[in-house]
Image (tube, helix red, strand yellow):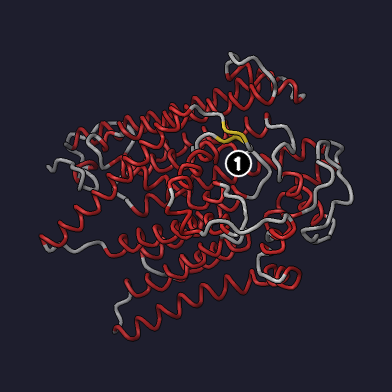
Amino acid sequence: MVTPTADTDTPPAADEPRGRPTGLTAAGAARLGVAGVVAVLVALGTLHALVVPPFLPPDETSHTAYALALSEGRYPMIDDFPGELPIPGMREGLSVWTSNHPPLVYLILAVPLRLGIALGEPLAGFHAARLSGVAAAAAGVALSAVLAALVVPRRPDVVVGAAALGGLIPHFVSTAGILYNDAWATLTATAALVAAALVLVRGPTRRSLGWLVAAATIALATRSSGAAAVAAAAGAAGLGTVLHRRDAWPWRLAVGIGAALGVAAVAVTVSAPMYLLNLQRYGDLTGRAALLGMFQREPRAPAFQRLAGASFWRDQQGQLFGQVVEGRYVPAELVLAVRGVVLLAIAALLAAGVRRAWRWRRHGETPDLARAATGLMLACYSAVIVYSVAEFAAVGGSQHARYLFPAAAVIGLAIAAGLGRLPYGWTLAWTAGAVGLWLAVNLVALRGFLVETYDLPASTALAPAAVDALAERGVPGAGVVVALLLTAGLAGLGCWLTAAWILARRGRAAA
């Protein structure tokens, strides 16, 4: 019997019959925990979708107008203005500046929007479109658990931790309930990462390569940030082929290069028309230069200078943990606590990596090249996403932390893996504390937003504030709706805690 240590991926005896705790298997517990996270996300995301006043978020009018224009057969330019404002609350005098994005997501959003207008209930259709974003975010969280299971298949504690710590980032939860394209970009990018990891870990097959091509194509057709997912997919196709084929090296390398180029070629070719239209209209593939020029944005500090400064990272964390719409509502103490947890997790993960490399070198152990390649792919992908945020800010764009969401699955995985390397990490003690902190920040931020937005007394608790907000929004049975959503969230949290308890018992039984 092997005692679990910080360098052990899982206690080898955790699934042996002898001495094993009864009840759910480790895999079953992991599924229960992930389902619990999804339930919490859906409950909180739905609450945000209902209590945030329509079109209060600055870009929501433009996103909605873009979807409605497509439903009428028009493909607007960024400086076009909507012909009509059919949904109450849409802001006047705003152009459809989001029309530089590919139209795929907006064609989906157009369905509930247009249906609501046709039925004479435009706000109902609008809220249905918001809730579709919550559903997309929930699906993305479920896929993030699949990604974690592919990377660390013998660590179900990391799987349930990754889903919670990536999926319950407060700004991700609140943005999921807004009619933006961020939740959809996160879903499609995560799907591409899962397909890429599958090819790297298990080797390329016709089916897995087909899924990889489809996922990469959809990611690029969702938002330009999907280009990073296409690069990851192409790299996975090439490297996965090289790692798993048994041909002579020259032929293996040639086939790998062909697979990489093939995946990239299909994704780019299918998505090319919408980007070429931008090139024709605005002079570049994304329309970014024309968009920044329209808003008279000027270049600022270079990207590498931003990344080298602490202010960039503090700003991103401040947004991720505390921002609802455009305001921040979390006390500095909670922000510092989150920062401490993240830094501790990163330090533990790096230390574990150094120890593992030393052990490989000293004892001559053969590393799992497929999973090492998967980790490298995820690290490079995340670095590209982070750099793109700094680079966009450098040319004059907004430094929105929601642009990091396509890497949310990797963020959650890295934090969960790091916390799992700490003493008692297998028992999920550190992870459970971090999840509790994440939830506390979610609730504090939402309560602060409600108190300020609806001019409520500062002492108002979250549940009464949510009821008052829904009542003001005209939602029937506001008290019942809040009670149902909070009950669903508590039930989801209970599922996650039950899963954590089962996995902790199995870890102790194997020790």
Q: Amino acid at mark 1?
A: Ala
Q: Residue at x 43, y 39 (%)?
A: 165
Q: Residue at x 18, y 41 (%)?
A: 4
Q: Position of residue 217 (x, y in %)?
A: 58, 65
Q: Quadrant of residue 236?
A: bottom left
Nearer-the-camera pick, 293 or 420: 293
Q: Residue at x 63, y 44 (%)?
A: 133
For this view, does 267 lie left or right of residue 361? right
Nearer-the-camera pick, 242 or 276: 276
The image shows residue 101, relative to residue 109, as above or below, that is below
Regarding mark 1 in the picture, which secondary structure is present there?
helix
Residue 107 showing in the rendered view: no
Q: Quadrant of the N terminus?
A: top left
**Number of marks in the rendered image:** 1
For this view, does 284 lie left or right of residue 170? right
Q: Quadrant of the C terminus?
A: top left
The image shows residue 379, relative to residue 434, as above or below, that is below
Residue at label 1? Answer: 176
Q: Residue at x 49, y 77 (%)?
A: 261
Nearer-the-camera pick, 463 or 292: 292
Nearer-the-camera pick, 316 or 511: 316
